[in-house]
Image: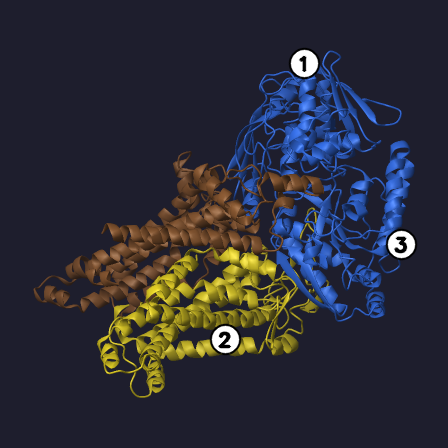
Amino acid sequence: MLTIFLSRLLRMVIVMLGISVITFLIFFATPGSDPAARIAGRNAAPETIAAVRHDFGLDRPLYVQYGLMMDRLFITRDLTSFANRGQKIVPTIMSAAPATLSLVAGAAILWMALGATTGIIAAAFRNRLPDKILMGASMMAVAMPVFWVGEMINLVTQSRLHDTWAFSWVPPLGYVPLTSDPAGWFFALVFPWICLALMYIGLYGRMLRTGIIETYQEDYIRTARSKGLSARRVLLKHATRTAIIPIVIMFGMDFGVLVGGAAVLTEVVFGINGVGRLTYQALKALDLPMIMATVLYASFFVVVANAIVDVLCVMIDPRMRQK
Amino acid sequence: MTSVSTDKLPPSPIGEGVSAPDGPWKRLLAGLLSSPTAVLSGIGLILILIAVLLAPLYANHVAHTDPFRSGLSAKIEVEGKTVPVMQRSTEGLGLGVTPIGPTWSGEYMLGADTQGRDVMARMLYGGRSSLLIAAASTVLTLALAAIIGVAAGYTGGLVDGVLSNLIDMMWAFPVYLLAISLSIVMIGKTFVLGPIELSSSSLIIPITIIGLVYVPYVARPVRGRVMTIKNSEFVLAARGLGVRRHRILMRHILPNVLSTLIVFAPMLTALNIVTESALSFLSVGVQAPNASWGTILQDGQSLLYSRPTVALAPGIAIMVTVLLLNLFGDVLRDVLDPKSARGR
Amino acid sequence: MDLMAISKTGRRGSALARLAITAAMIPAVVPALAQAQDAHRGGTMHLMAVASGGTLDPQINYTAQFWQLYSATYDGLVAFKKADGPESNTVVPDLAAEMPTVSADGKTYTFTLRKGVKFSNGDDVTTEDVVASLRRIFKVSSPTSGSFYNGIVGAEDCLSSPADCTLEGGVIADGTANTVTINLVAADPEFLFKLSAPHASILPKGTASKDMGNTPIPGTGTYMFTSYDANNSLTMERNPHFVEWSVDAQPEGYADTIEYKFGGTEESAVNAVMNGQADWSFDPLPADRLAELSTNATDQLHVHAQSAWWYAPMNVNISPFNDVRARQALNYAVDRNALVSVFGGPALAQPVCQILPPDFPGHEDSCIYTQDPGDTWSAPDMDKARALVAESGTKGEKVNVVTEDNAASRGVGTYLQSVLSDLGYDATVQTVSGDIQFTYIQNTNNNVQISVTQWYMDYPAASNFLNVLFGCGSFHPGSDSSINIAGFCDEEIDARMKAAMTLGATDPEAANAEWAKIDNAVMEKAPAVPLFTPRRLDLLSERVGNFEYSSLFNWLIAKSWVQ
């Protein structure tokens, strides 16, 4: 077991190392990526740029720069941005993380609850009208680009109908820290939650429905039903429980990716200063230290989620251990 | 959003590596034709395709406009009156210029964008780019995934280890860094690959990027499937009988991989349409004045409060196309993969 | 990095604003009215921006966003007058008790330091602080160290080895006489402008010689920074040691606290101001809200001219724009009126076809690229443009326009692409992230043919446009910092510019007349297409009173009240 754990850990480290090296190389292969002139400022004299270049170690060989960056990111933790001079990277990401976590956690609760409801109801009414309506709606939810949904929500709640009773409570876009104003936190996140959750409700609902229908046909469920257990009890207790396992696995992956910053579009549209938006801004400014940190931050969640899912798979289905 | 994950796409069905017996294509067609959903969504998709292919006809004969030329000083006739397409505000402080709204007739049916261009005509041309990008990147993804998946799954050992790690890295890699980097690298450059000449204003950047993004999602199940087939009883038996490796590959493994790939195709195309729009929304996709549904959406974003149709129209187009592709893909999967159809 | 949205000569404000200014000036004279002023004192001002302006270090930050804040938190020896309109272009004594005495050769400036001024940490401002601060400009490699302050004796050594900077012989303090003497290598009529920039702020001598980043440095202004998180918010509070010494240089602020929030979108900022949840937003107002706001919020909007231009520099060293006829053709062909539409209409942009902005020193109305050339632009001349393209033999060549990825720049670029196609070129347009585009288009290695960019003045002098943007000295092939983007270097014109700068030290008016001629001479060579002069539009909440607009610092926050 320990060897499995260690080899898994090694693999995670290799993946993250690889990603950091590729990111680093892509950055320096991009024309116009040299940050010296941007750090130095508009119309800086050549001497000033040379001084800045030396100051930031940009005149050193690439492998030295890479080593220094990793050192300042993980050991001394005082790596600073190329774009916002003086902005420390690690604290910035740490301060952006709660916003992303609030967004993703709330959306996750929403999509798990509604996704499960959708799936169970649809399965219970298989091939009848409620099933068809729910599955149609789910497909629609999956088909809509998330930023477009966000824009439309903003159009309605922030402008068109903002002065009506229905949406006058909607606060301006942006994140309100939970600690400073819990009510404000909640209201500011209601629509971002809905927007982000919508697609997952559709996906999870559909998956749960087919999962339940499948387990219905398994032998032990048939046995349970022949024993005279009520249909509802079978549905809720046995079929759903079995069918929810792949969903839990999927949830782990999605949650990891989103917490790592994949909710960027929702964050951008709703002006939430989370990790995704940070990544996006860093990319737009080609701010290598921030890109490096956010990319590693994101990949950390991805590889961890990956590993957890693999472990879960083995626990659920020991046959997979041979692989 | 990259987590529009293909975790939701079908897993590689485990078990018997059946290379379909007689006339697999005929069986596929029959299966599709017997499903009303498949027929209707197929017809819908064909109609969309015809519409976007007729874009030049529409632009020349209905809208009478060049959708790639700025029309900031253009004027049109509405209800007998000649009005400018870009309408300057005259009330209050007189700030702001608003493009003309939907006329619901031939010219400027859906109104104009910030450059005074006909949105409807751009929608049709944009659909061409969006669909072309989505389809081409799907082909790219499937080809790369098949190569990586088969190589990793069939060879095993060190090759598998390296490729699997590579797939993991690609999965966790930031797409937009690649996109931004590529779009700068390619500014004003022309790439010549043998007889093909690609300039940066072509759609090559979005196709390459989107084509790479989802490789891991497909490569993993392909690898899984190849491994199961490789270890299945009848392949082991065949090898025991001395059948050569490449024959096993050609006869048993590739046909199975192909059916996995076909199952992925429509869903991947749907996913790619959405991804294209997201890239364009973050302005690393199709470059102006060329249009795609994503770029029109981006244009529409800056007109959201005054002319919401410009953002609504491409959104709806994307939604409908994706919906049809997914419906079609569902049936296709059911037909090709009865077991997983029951499972999912 | 945001380009500095610095602007100029306030246009005539509304009658109401005029009245308010008068009201604000009276209390200083009439004690009875002081209470009226006190009635406005207090409260919290809420500002918004989509993103922050980066480091808080006033000697490094080069953004309009934070320069606006520095005007109320830091002081130099001299300062631009904190006043509304054209007056804000004049330099007044700040930490210096009076304007410096200048030697006959214009090389030596002697400042007497004002007594009794304290930093926000309670320390007195001494001559040592002044010397340390001027050295620090070089020690931290301030963006302008090589362009503004390189004329100080000893600056060359400081630029080559910043860490050991002493400015020996350049800056001399006399603690007993309380004076600071600055020696220049050559006379510089613009030197006091340069000393008025925030990069020459006087900071405590103990300030570390490195970018202080998010850590506030004590200053002498009416406010001090108390907290800053670049990703969330910034707070300014009253400086407890502040006593108003000159209402022109550093007026006491009305609001007790200023809170600046970062995040959201431009759209949401407008909504927040309109719904009374914020008082002002830094970012430009979204174009599609203008029509609605100009009827609903007439009293809350303030439009001001800016000393700036939007232009399309054409690379004069590579095809097709290495042919002067091709460059002139595009100048004739561009319909400035159409571009004005892209930017939000005539109230927000004024068509131009010369370099110096209207009302700027050295500006004389002239337009050579229009139908019926004369004082102003009237309409494009496509026939002439097509003829010039045909003559130049560049027809059919590939041209790529590089723009920023914001709506306005993309709009301008797309329009230019359209015009270039009409002229017979094979034109494309490429959008690059704004932060990267500005350095990208400067580097000759990137072979950019034509791009869309803007320039805002640093200080009100013609050389800040002509010499900086089209002088041989600003052209550095292969460097990311080569602000002469067109790569235009004409020996004769360059010599005339140098002469005009020297002339400016003795006869500013004659110099400005010469600058007007130089403007024309450069335009005849057409290294760029002037597009339009942008105007600054500020939207304030209903509760904000007394809007005053400085050319360099935009809205003077300290002079407005919220109650």
Q: Is residue C47 left or right of residue A41?
A: left
Output the chain of dot 3: C
Q: Verify CB contact (< 8 Å) between mark 3 and mark 1.
A: no
For label 2, count other residues whose C-alpha is less than 10 Å away and answer few (under 14), some (14-19) or many (20+).
some
- Checking the image for residue C374, the label placed there is 3
Give percent across and percent down for residue C432. Answer: 62, 56
Specify the farthest residue to the bottom: B22
Is residue A173 shown above or below A181? below
Residue plotted at (86% across, 46% down): C494
* Figure chain in blue: C
Is residue A59 shown above or below A195? above
* Figure chain in brown: A
* Figure chain in yellow: B
What type is the residue that disc 1 sits on? Gly
Q: Examine the image and state in which quarter residue B167 appears.
A: bottom left
Give percent across and percent down for residue C216. Answer: 56, 28
Q: Do labels 1 and 2 share a chain?
A: no
For disc 1, the marked residue is: C116
Q: How far apart are marks 3 and 1 (CA)?
A: 56 Å
For disc 2, the marked residue is: B48
Give percent across and percent down for residue B134. Answer: 49, 69
User: Relative to the observer, which residue lies in front, C54 or A10?
Assistant: A10
| Quarter placement of the C terminus of chain B | bottom left
Q: How far apart are marks 1 and 2 (CA)?
A: 78 Å
Q: Examine the image and state in which quarter residue C538 appears.
A: top right
Q: Verify CB contact (< 8 Å) between mark 1 and mark 2.
A: no
Q: Nearer the viewer, mark 3 or mark 1?
A: 1
